[in-house]
Amino acid sequence: MPDIQHVDIGPCWVKFGTLGSETNLGWTKGGVKLAVDTQTTEIEVDQETDPVKTNITKRPITVSAPLAEFTLEVLGFALPGSTLYTNKATLTTNLTGENNDLVFTAKTTGDNRGPGNDISIQYIDPGTVTAACSVAVSGKAIAVTLKYADSAVTALASEVKTAIENSTAAAALVTVANAAENTGAGVVTAMAVTFLTGGKQKLVVESAANEDLNDYANSLILHPTNREDADKSMDVWFPAAIPVGKFDVTYEKENPKIITLEFKAFPDTSGKTLVIGDTTTTEA
């Protein structure tokens, strides 16, 4: 019977990179297009008026993704052979007291964009008894509510470090280490919102004549945005997709810059070019 639940509309997320740790390439504008072109040839014989057989000769598969986030990371994906250099943003605290300063360094891998100058750290004095440090993350703002007892903050720098490292969201943004000549054994103080600084990036594009594009093949996933991350039932997976550097960027006052990233799909070592649905399905 027909089922309205099978009528599907809506955009998708585009994820690309090493299998199992693909990077979400962010917002798109204009629709992601998947094109499959099965090409055939007809076999004819003298004794028959109609073809007696049809063979598939090739099946080129392409994905066109108009990416709306204009970043050096996205440009790097669009230009195979380019190299992205990143100087990570850092923050070294300068608190009153001894052995209580930490160094925060931005993480610039995975879904993180930019060198990290937009990451901030805050230490909050709760003003009431708090048994342990706790961490809250909003976007790229990390707020640490400090341990408090006997009318004062009692949180050690080492405890702040541990709390951030134990927070999945915070640990995805920064690494933490003791500042030079600091042991982490000192009590910290409240600190206003403070941004990491000094981060820089550049993308270097060099001659890529005769480069083998297969060297840049990676896992590509199209995941419908109307499904939970764990729901892979309508995912489209390309185990060996190659990004091709074709795009036009217009600098104008009204419309955002769009990088249309084009992928070509090729078979992997097992012969798979395209898998639609949950890849964990048993093949039996």
Image (cartoon, rainbow, N blue to C red):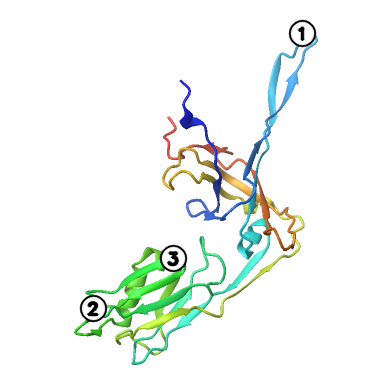
- Left or right? Give the position of 112 relative to 70: left
Extreme residue toward the top, this view = 47
Q: What separation in Å lies between label 2 and label 1 (alpha carbons)?
A: 92 Å
Q: Nearer the viewer, mark 1 or mark 3?
A: 3
Extreme residue toward the right, this view = 46
Between 184 and 51, the one lying in front of the other is: 184
Q: Which residue is mark 3?
A: 172
Residue 227's place in the image compared with 252, above or below, is above
Q: Considering only order in the chain, which callout, 3 or 1, is on the residue closer to the N terminus?
A: 1
How many numbered marks are there? 3
The quadrant in which residue 98 appears is: bottom left
- Left or right? Give the position of 129 relative to 261: left
CB under 8 Å between discs 3 and 2: no
Q: Considering only order in the chain, which callout, 2 or 3, is on the residue closer to the N terminus?
A: 2
Q: Position of residue 109 (x, y in %)?
A: 52, 64
- Left or right? Give the position of 162 relative to 128: right
Q: Does dot 3 land on a helix, a strand or a loop?
A: loop
Q: Which residue is mark 1?
A: 48
Extreme residue toward the bottom, this view = 97
- Rendered residue at 71%/65% (across/down): 205
The quadrant in which residue 281 appears is: top left
Q: Position of residue 265 (x, y in %)?
A: 63, 43
Q: Which residue is mark 2?
A: 128
Q: Amino acid at mark 3?
A: Ala
Q: What separation in Å lies between label 1 and label 3 (alpha carbons)?
A: 67 Å
